[in-house]
Structure formats: structure tokens, C-alpha cells
Amino acid sequence: MKHIFTFCLVLVMGFTIQAQDKWFTRSGEISFHSSTPVEDIDAVSKTASSVLVPSTGQIQFSVGMKSFVFQRALMQEHFNENYVESDKYPKATFKGKIDDLSKVDFTTPGTYEVTVSGQLTVHGKMNPVKTNATIVVSKDGIHANASFDVTPQDYDIAIPKMVEDKIAKQITVKIKATYQPLNK
């Protein structure tokens, strides 16, 4: 009986250690900015989910396309219905890793500059993304920030001729996330 209890205790502790190695957020912020001489377009979602595994550097994001809020309701409607087809492609995802993980000490507060690479899927189309990111380890969590450019054409997002001068050829995407330990 004593051995069974010890085995169960070790098993539970093993799962606890593994779960604590994952950090999570459901309130990640993803924004994008399109700037042309004719018009600037900004949108933001504050409901992105993300998991970070410090031991391996693996990182994943998922954001509902309909969660993006625009300055004007008509922009939001066109974005969801005409461009990203949110009913058909409801989410954008990123699956990747911190390339230079050895630069980060997740046990020591500080600011760490890293490179992140992975696959971004938008509108059902997957493309590689590689960008610089900042990771800040603090007593209140792990904070991550990154910025990169995407091209609507690379994700098979068609821009109608009559509005092509209002939408930038490259759109800047910014990501901010504050992670807390994932406790299962």
C-alpha cells in the first residue's frame, strides 16, 4: 500500500511539474496597421490565446478573426465578409519556436531579445514567418512582444481594384502577450 501511495504521489508531482512548464494567456493582443496615402486602417483583438513552453521554446497563438475591432463598423464588416472570409476561415494561427532559446533565462527577471520563427496560417493559407521578439521575465509573468509584416496576397486575400489604393501592400502585425503558469 505504501508503494502504491508513493507511486501515485510521484505520478501527480510529475504532471504538476510538466503543467507548470507551460505558460498561457487568453488575453493576448494582436493588432494590425495598414497605411496608405489615402487611408490608415487599424484593428485590434485582445482575445488571442497563446501557449509558451519555456523548456522547448515552442509557442502557439490562435485568434478569432471576428474578434478584431476596427475604427469603423463598415471596415470590420468588409474585413470579415469580403477579405478574410471569417465564416469560412474563423481563426488565424501561429505555431513556432524561439530560435535562440539559450539567450533566455526564464528563472531570472530580465529583458531578452530573441528570434522567433514558425508558420502563420491566415485565410486557410500557411506561410513561414521569422521575426525579432522581446521577452520580459518578471515577477508577474512572462511578457512577449513582436512585430512583423504580412502581405495579403501571400494569404490569398483578394483586394478589389476599387479599394486597392486604400489597403497597404504590406500590413504590420503586432503581438503582445502576458503569460501566467498553466495549472491543469
Image (tube, rainbow, N blue to C red):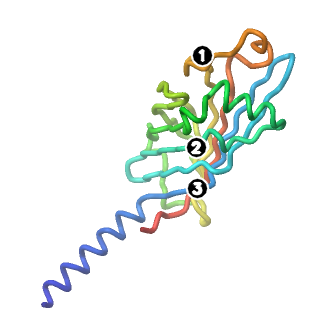
- Under mark 1, the amino acid is Gln
| Secondary element type, mark 3 | strand
Q: The C terminus lies in which quarter of the figure?
A: bottom left
How dense is the environment of label 3, judged by Cα within 10 Å: few (below 14), some, or many (20 and up)?
some
Residue drawn where x is 63% and y is 54% of the image: 27
Residue beneath label 1, please? 153
* Sequence order check, earlier mark of 3 and 1: 3
Residue beneath label 2, please? 63
Q: CA distance from mark 3 to mark 1?
A: 29 Å
Residue 29 placement, left or right of 100: right
- Label annotation for residue 178: none
| Secondary element type, mark 2 | strand
Tell me where residue 49 appears, x and y as whole percent: 55, 51
How dense is the environment of label 2, judged by Cα within 10 Å: few (below 14), some, or many (20 and up)?
many
How dense is the environment of label 1, judged by Cα within 10 Å: few (below 14), some, or many (20 and up)?
few
Tell me where residue 9 appears, x and y as whole percent: 26, 80
Residue beneath label 3, please? 26
In the displayed structure, 20 sits above or below 96; it is: below
Residue drawn where x is 67% and y is 29% of the image: 81
Tell which residue pokes out farthest to the right in this image: 38
* Sequence order check, earlier mark of 1 and 2: 2
- Under mark 3, the amino acid is Arg
In the displayed structure, 120 sits above or below 136; it is: above
- Under mark 2, the amino acid is Val
Is the Cβ of the residue at disc 3 closer than 8 Å to that at disc 2? no
Q: Does the rendering let one see residue 110?
A: no
